[in-house]
Amino acid sequence: MLSLLYLSFASIFPVFGWIFVGALLIRLFPTLQAAFRRGEKFVFFLGIPGILFITASRIEPAAAFSSNHTLAGIIATVCCVAGSWQIAKWRGHTLEQRGIVAQAGFRANLAIIGLALCASTFGEEGLALAALPVAVWTLIFNVLAVFVLNAAYGGQFAALPLAIALLKNPLIIGICLGFGAALLALPIPQAIYQGGSYFTAAVIPLSLILLGGAIDLKPSRESRKATRLACLLRLLIAPLLSILIALLMGVRNMELGIYFLLLSGPVAAASHIMVTAKGGDGKLSANIVVLSTVLAPLTMTLGFFLLKVLALV
């Protein structure tokens, strides 16, 4: 039992350790701000897309399309956004707070924290299994976020601009190119995969450090109830609901572990960006990102430990 707990701890906590290293560095050396911003562009436009291309190119198309953990994640995400919105309404939150809480309830950090956890826990095989769901769920997350925030702040849903934005997303491009190479069985030199292993080993810690540098460690004290509810939904209720749906759909073993690590993480920083772009309560959305990132190592370690104890992973 203790060995399982240690394994769960050893898989998850080091990933979040890099985030807190980044948060510490930017506070000790404020002059690193410019370097951090340049690093973020590298990670977003080249680093993570490059990892996703390499991993997606190794996917077995037949196995990818026959797996149902991606479909389970779509169903879970839709249930989580609907449930989060309704719970926030029952709790008496304003329409704007409802939108922020609902987005936080379903939008986990897939591309950085989720991928890092899959690599830390399952290695290259875990990254390969995570590539397709990350691509599909990233699309779903963005579409649902637009719907939710339009409902909260007003605005029309414009399908064409959203589609163009999604097609221009570097993460989507990287995965689609890699999966296309897998479908066409294009010969990719082994040297590229060898170099990709070193590239992945360097980019993932870098991306986590940069994410830590972007976190505001001095959140306001306003809207505490909404912050607590959003973290409760994201870190406890949404993972529990997601796992129940996955189990009912027969997802087990490594696929279930990948599924859990991707969908039980803290709120994605992109949720804060979308709220501020709408002119919403940026402090509330930032508070939710910060608190969920601080608490996630504990909740994810406990959740992964329970899955191991029950022999589901």
Image (cartoon, rainbow, N blue to C red):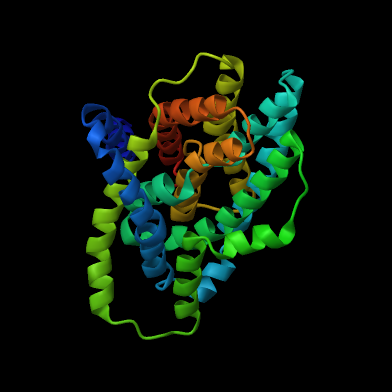
- Of residue 51 and residue 151, the one placed in the foreground of this image is 151
Q: Is residue 68 visible?
A: no
Q: How many marks?
A: 0
Which residue shows up at 48% across the image and 84% down it?
Answer: 184
Q: Position of residue 189 (x, y in %)?
A: 28, 82
Q: Position of residue 124 (x, y in %)?
A: 33, 61
Q: Position of residue 66 (x, y in %)?
A: 58, 68
- Of residue 199 and residue 68, the one placed in the foreground of this image is 199
Which quadrant of the rendered structure holds the N terminus? top left
Q: Is residue 151 shown left or right of residue 185?
A: right
Which image quadrant for residue 200? bottom left
Which residue shows up at 70% across the image and 28% down it?
Answer: 96
- Of residue 252 and residue 91, the one placed in the foreground of this image is 91
Which residue shows up at 40% across the image and 59% down it?
Answer: 45
Q: Is residue 147 visible?
A: yes
Q: Position of residue 111 (x, y in %)?
A: 44, 51
Q: Is residue 122 shown left or right of residue 227?
A: left
Which image quadrant for residue 3? top left
Q: Is residue 65 shown left or right of residue 97?
A: left
Question: Eyeballing the image, is 33 above or below 169?
Answer: above
Question: Eyeballing the image, is 9 above or below 258?
Answer: above
Question: Eyeballing the image, is 311 above or below 139?
Answer: above
